[in-house]
Image (cartoon, rainbow, N blue to C red):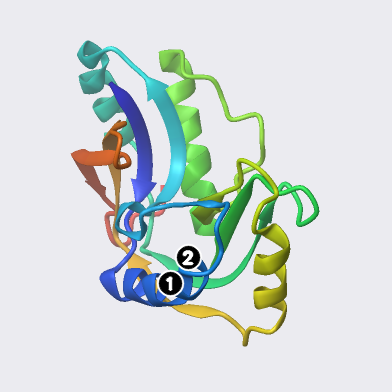
Amino acid sequence: MRLFVALDIPEEVRRALTEWVARFRESIRGPRWTRIEGLHVTLKFIGETPSERVDEIRAALASIHQGAPIELRFRGAGFFPNERHPRVFWAGIESGPELAALAESVERQLVPLGFPREARAFQPHLTLARFPSSEGLQQLREKLAGAAPIEFGASRERQFHLYQSVLKPGGSEYTRLASFDFPEGDSR
């Protein structure tokens, strides 16, 4: 099973992203555009895992106590690792320290189970496209330079989820395996 831990994003943010990306997708060939309906805020990519380990992962994640809902603002766009030689085109996510703290809690709970820590620092984002080559890159840069400030919406998340991802020819298919609520008022 291919697993990851994530926050969902609201439909109104998905709609705003769909409308915005459509302007680029129609005219810019080259990037492999992601399916907006599959976007989520990844806290931890676990990867291929035997199905018999799901219960212990679920138990470890259930022990996380996030004290309050997490406020997210979806705004801006950019490139990883940089604009000159990008591999990924992304939409930004702004949040207080609670989001990074939740990602760190997920890491901390999964390391004892043998899942290594991420080597890179946590940078919340939504992957909009991947660049297998530089085709379309200059055209995308030009369109972004003339664009107004980019705002996709906001959300207040009260739970995070364990997902299974199945790779299919038409894109990944996601199944939610478990959800974990943030107990209000609990600051442990």
- Which residue extends farthest bottom? 148
- Residue 55 rendering spot, x and y as whole percentages: 21, 21
Q: Is residue 40 above or below residue 57?
A: below
What residue did someone put label 2 on? 25
Q: Is any part of residue 164 visible from this angle?
A: yes
The quadrant where residue 168 appears: top left
Q: Residue at x 55, y 53 (%)?
A: 124
Q: Residue at x 49, y 32 (%)?
A: 107
- Disc 1 to disc 2, C-alpha distance: 5 Å
- Which residue extends farthest right? 84
- Residue 56 rendering spot, x and y as whole percentages: 26, 19
Circles 1 and 2, Cβ within 8 Å, touching? The answer is yes
Front-most of 115 and 176?
176
Quadrant showing the N terminus:
top left
Q: Is residue 115 above or below residue 95?
A: above
Helix, strand or loop for disc 2 = helix
Q: Residue at x 57, y 58 (%)?
A: 90
Mark drawn on residue 122:
none
What residue did someone put label 1 on? 22
Front-most of 18 and 176?
18
